[in-house]
Amino acid sequence: MKTIFQRTEITEPAMFSPSDTTQKIEGFPEICVSTFSRRFFEKFITLDNVEKIAELHSVNVDTPVYKINYKGKDIAFYQSMVGAPACVGYFEEIIAMGAKKFVLFGSCGVLNDAEVDGRIMIPVSAVRDEGTSYHYAAPSAEIEADPRCVQVLENILKSRDCPYVKGKTWTTDAFYRETLPIVRERKEAGCLTVEMECASMLAASRYRNIPFIQFLFGADNLSADTWDIRDLETAGLAGTEKYMVLAFECGIGL
């Protein structure tokens, strides 16, 4: 028996699609932005002219979807679930509602503090140590980001004088199994960061033909042999408004 990790091609058709479970919404914004942080999300919904337009449903939580007008463009915004399967599931349903461009941002573990500290990380590729991406793209060690989308993000960061670094990220399903040998191996392979969604989102967005940008900022530090929690719980909170504006600009840029 072959598992999904040994198959050389993606099989079709699917038994059911996102449109079978999620209704298309008239006038849904083409641009959608999302983040993982509850504190970011709570900050967003206090902004002026924010309007609830939909809900995403799962067995353990209902997630509201809001709309804001930024520079004359309607932009949808919601809080993503952590972990590749849940994150991609919501992404699929947002597309079914009507989204055509997608921007995701959030924190990450740092594998190379000298490169990442104080900078926004632009993933140009992701190591596929998770499972979801293999249902959207044939097996490979890594998956690359769309160069055009990377360029859009890079141009926006340059125009706003935001320090950044481009590089490889490591997407894992099991944060409590980031063992020292594997961490060292990923660092030696050039990974700057570790997170739980990027590889899957790159694969799913490519499969659905949705322009997709993701940017990361450092939280806990794994660049030494001893883990440093640093500001894991509040990562990026001081830059909330900056990250939101960057995400909105990326959406318009797509």
Image (spheres, rainbow, N blue to C red):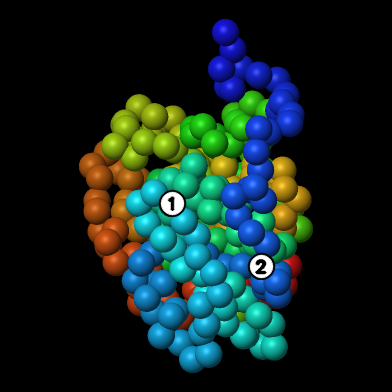
Question: Is 232 in front, or is 189?
Answer: 232
Residue where numbered disc 2 is placed: 25
Q: In which quarter of the image is the N terminus?
A: top right
Q: Is residue 194 left or right of residue 137?
A: left
Q: Which of the two discs, 2 and 1, labels the residue nearer the N terminus?
A: 2
Residue at 69% of width from left, 82% of height from top?
Answer: 73
Residue at 43% of width from left, 80% of height from top?
Answer: 45
Percent coordinates x, y for residue 249 in the rendering: 64, 76
Residue at 60% of width from left, 63% of height from top?
Answer: 103
Q: Which secondary structure lies at badge 1?
A: loop
**Vertical comparison of 129 with 126: above or below:** above
Q: In this view, does 208 lie to the left or right of 199?
A: right
* Residue at the extreme bottom of the image, as rendered: 48
Query: Identity of the amino acid at label 1?
Result: Ser
Query: Identity of the amino acid at label 2?
Result: Ile
Residue at 52% of width from left, 40% of height from top?
Answer: 190
Alpha-carbon neighbours of circle 2 within 10 Å: few (<14), some, or many (≥20)? some
Does the image show residue 166?
A: no
Percent coordinates x, y for residue 77 in the rendering: 54, 71
* Residue at the extreme top of the image, as rendered: 1
Q: In which quarter of the image is the C terminus?
A: bottom right
Residue 43, by quadrant, is: bottom left
Alpha-carbon neighbours of circle 1 within 10 Å: few (<14), some, or many (≥20)? few
Residue 62, by quadrant, is: bottom left
Mark 2 to mark 1: distance in Å? 18 Å
Q: Which secondary structure lies at badge 2?
A: loop
Residue where numbered disc 1 is placed: 58
Percent coordinates x, y for residue 19 in the rendering: 67, 51
Q: Do the residues labelled 2 and 1 touch (CB within 8 Å)?
A: no
